[in-house]
Structure formats: structure tokens, C-alpha cells
Amino acid sequence: MTPERFQHITSSYKNLKIAVIGDFCLDRYLEIDTGRQEISIETNLPVYNVTRVRAQPGGAGTIVNNLVALGVGQIIPVGFCGDDGEGYELRRSLSALPGLTLDHFLTTTDRRTFTYCKPLLMHPGQAPEELNRLDSKNWTITPPALEAHLAEHLRQVAEQADALIFLIQVDEPETGAITQGLLKVVGELAEKYPDKPMLADSRQSLKGWPPVSFKMNAAELGALLGQTGEMPLDQVKTAASEMAQTNGRTVFVSLSERGILGAEPKKNPEHVPALPLRGPIDIVGAGDSVTANLATALAAGATVKEALELASVASSHVIHQLGTTGAASVANIQALMP
């Protein structure tokens, strides 16, 4: 990609409206000072003294963080949080981000706020050491009234957004924002707006999803096909091309150290290799940075090959950010462009 083409694509990000639909959670980091050790009088167990607490939007919020870093003009979250302390913290974190409108982000007493609590041992001069995570999730199905409310908001934002990003982060089906009922609405919108970028990513597999653009990693592709082990690149290309032909939309597959691939209907798939590693890495958030960059670049008029190049470089920047769920700005990407 030439510097002129890079500038042409990224300069329009400020004019875009992108909606992010799915499971928003709170990433809460507890920084533990390893120099402040003591033993509990009551339990005789070591005490972890937390000297700093920081929080940021996670799950679909990580995609939002990346869109903010890219300078997207308007970002529209569609999802929910609980009417609890974590929900207050999540809404406050989201509202502090530039370009966000929370008119379609719901607070409900029927759900608790999905929270990842991440204790970190802070060693001087070293990368943080993450301990066992403490998760708070919903284990019952999303109430039909909330599902209907989300569907109404999704229809409203789909008309005005330049691109839609869907993310299922929850492990238990039907417990998050994107349920089978909401997927019916996604199918309606995919048919109504055939040329609008719509990217879907799901921890639960994309099997049974309506025909939008699929974004997955190699392991998720293998699971979708009922295969185990690493798939050869040629096999990935064939499988992605067949899915793209069936959906009528581009399929994207991230391949870790092998790079990233995009297959359009009736075209040869494009493959972009990964950048070399530049030190220790932390892969948390890399997939979300890929999703955000693909959707934004495509909404800005980039070709699939150009979108892949931008997403690949962005993820390379993100994985080198340790102890946090990172994001890449346009300047960060430009600095690493080959």
C-alpha cells in the first residue's frame, strides 16, 4: 500500500459511523504490589495488597476501544449492562470515550454486568504476572423483553451506520446480547443492506449465522468444519472461499504467525503475512483489533487486500502491549507499515 493510499483511506475514518452490537463487559485490573506482603491473621494465608485498580470496556468494548483509537467519528454501542456497580463503571468508561453515543446501550435489572476481574502481580522491571481471573457472568437466558428491546435498537442503528460489527463473547448460548431472536433481525438487515459491511465474530461458532461476513481464527474455522489440528494454508483458502460463495460476503480468517486471509465470493483469496515479532507478546485483544480495522477500512472504501494489510499491522502493534487489552491508532499502524 502506498503512503498516499494509506492517507486516503484513513483520513475518512473521522466521517464514519460504526455500530458495535454484542456482549460488552468490564475489564477490571487489580495491580498487586509484590513488595507489600503480609499474612492474614484470620486465615494464615498470604494477602495480596491491591495498590491500583483500573478498568476499561472489554468484550465488544475492546472493539470500541480500537475504533476510538482509529479516530472513527461516531461509534454506536448496542448492548446492555446490569444495574449494578460494575455496570456504572462500564457506562462511565464508555461515556468517557470520544465519539460514542450511548442512546442504544441499555441498563437492565434483569442482567448482571459481564465482568472480567484480572489480578496482576506487579514485579519491578518485569512484565505483569496475571493470576487466575475472576469472572462474573449471566447463567440464565436473556429475557425476551430485553431481546425485543435490543432488536428495536439494532434496526434503528443499522439504517444510519456505515458498518455493523457483531460479537458474541459469552460462552453459554442465549445468555448475552445476541440471541437466536436477534440473529433473525441480523438476517433481515443483511438482506436489506447487501453492500454495507457487516462483520460477525463469535466464541460460540458462527454456525447457523445469517449471511454476513464471517471473521474467525484458524481454530474456529477448523471447529466449524469438524476438523482438528492445524489446517494447511491451501485448505484454509478453499474452505474460506466456499463459505464466501455460500454467504455472498467476504470471509476473514486470522492465522496467528501465518498472517491473515480474506476470501471474497468468486475471487481468489488474498493472504497477508504476519509481521515479525519484536519482543514479548500478549495476544489478548488482537482478534478484536483485527475486526475493528477490517470493518473500518472496508467502510472507508478499502479493498479486501488493503483492509487485510491494515488489520495485520494493527494486530502486530496490539500483541506487543503487555498487561492490558491494547489498541492501535492510525499513527501506530503507519509507523509499522512495510
Image (cartoon, helix red, strand yellow):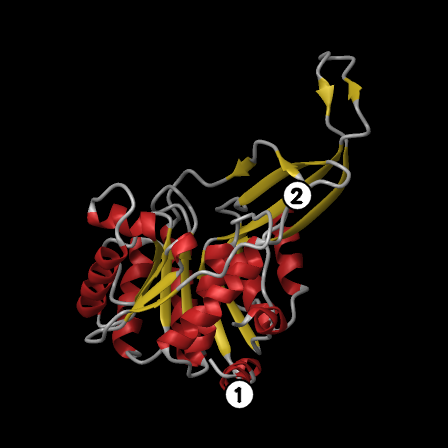
- Identity of the amino acid at label 1? Glu
Q: Is residue 214 above or below residue 337?
A: above
Structural crowding at the residue carrying mark 1, measured as other residues with C-alpha within 10 Å and reported as few (<14), some (14–19) or many (≥20): few
Residue 209 or 147: which is nearer the viewer? 209
Q: Position of residue 27 (x, y in %)?
A: 60, 47
Q: Which residue is mark 1?
A: 4
Residue 273 or 287: which is nearer the viewer? 273
Residue at screen point 53% across, 48% down: 109
Q: Which residue is mark 2?
A: 29
Residue at screen point 20% across, 44% down: 226
Q: Is residue 95 above or below residue 230?
A: below
Q: How many marks?
A: 2
Residue at screen point 53% across, 44% down: 112
Find the distance from the CA under tag 2 to the CA under tag 1. 40 Å
Q: Is residue 181 visible?
A: yes
2 or 1: tag closer to the N-terminus: 1
Q: Quick one: SS at disc 1?
A: helix
Is 219 left, or right, of 52 in this rendering? left
Residue at screen point 59% across, 47% down: 280
User: Which label sits on residue 308?
Assistant: none
